[in-house]
Image (cartoon, rainbow, N blue to C red):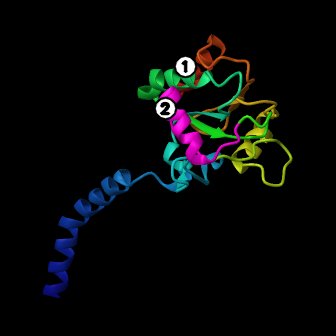
Amino acid sequence: MNNTHAIAKLCKVFLPALMACSAVASHAAPTSPAACPALLQREMPRLQDEKPQALCQYAGKVVLVVNTASFCGFTSQYKALEALAERYADRGLVVLGFPSNDFGSQEPGSNKEIAEFCENTFNVKFPMFAKSVVKAGKPDTNPLFADLIKRSGSAPKWNFHKYLISRDGQQVISFWSTTDPLSSSVTTEVERLLAKP
């Protein structure tokens, strides 16, 4: 009886403290994979070395996805994209570039050649991924682009088509190739989405 009484007394003293610790630990636990929007739940090979990169590393950010090309009339948009990425990086914007040879065969080089061009010509620092197919309806269409096309109802018709994704992945806004990344039509939407939690 004495032992039982002593254990009951100890429980009465320590149990509330243990429960409080458990509650703190559960709040401090790392973000669960469920916090990553379905759109980003995939891996893509990095341009520089083709190592798979989890797009969930950008969960919680506003993401601008762009299909790029090195020899296009819009190639100079790399400069504006880099400026946009730098301007809003601290507030949670990330730009992701996806080279493609789909339009006018204006991205014929290897991944290594594309990486060197981006770095040497435009000093691109935002994340770039391996060359892929972005046209709608192809059997090997990049699955991220396939989902973006489905969500937005707008498919790339040329290089430098842009998709802006909200932090929760629920909203996708599409911009044509002719839309400059630093234009008010883009920056207004970027700021609107960045203002949302």
The residue positioned 17% from the left and 72% from the top of the image is 10
Residue under label 2, please give it. 120
Residue under label 1, please give it. 191
Residue furthest top as drawn: 184
Image vertical order of residue 50 relative to residue 131, above or below: below
Q: Is 57 contained in the magenta span?
A: no
Dot 2 crowding, Cα within 10 Å, few <14, some 14–19, many 20+: few
The residue positioned 22% from the left and 60% from the top of the image is 17
Q: Quadrant of residue 65?
A: top right
The residue positioned 13% from the left and 86% from the top of the image is 2
Q: Quadrant of residue 26?
A: bottom left
**Span highlighted in magenta in the image:** 107-129
29 vs 48, left or right, is left
Image vertical order of residue 43 relative to residue 6, above or below: above
Q: Quadrant of residue 72?
A: top right
* 146 or 178: nearer the viewer: 178
* 84 or 110: nearer the viewer: 110
Q: Earlier in the sequence, mark 2 or mark 1?
A: 2
The residue positioned 52% from the left and 43% from the top of the image is 59
Give the amino acid at mark 2. Answer: Asn
Q: Report the mark closest to the observer, 2 or 1.
A: 2
Give the amino acid at mark 1. Answer: Glu
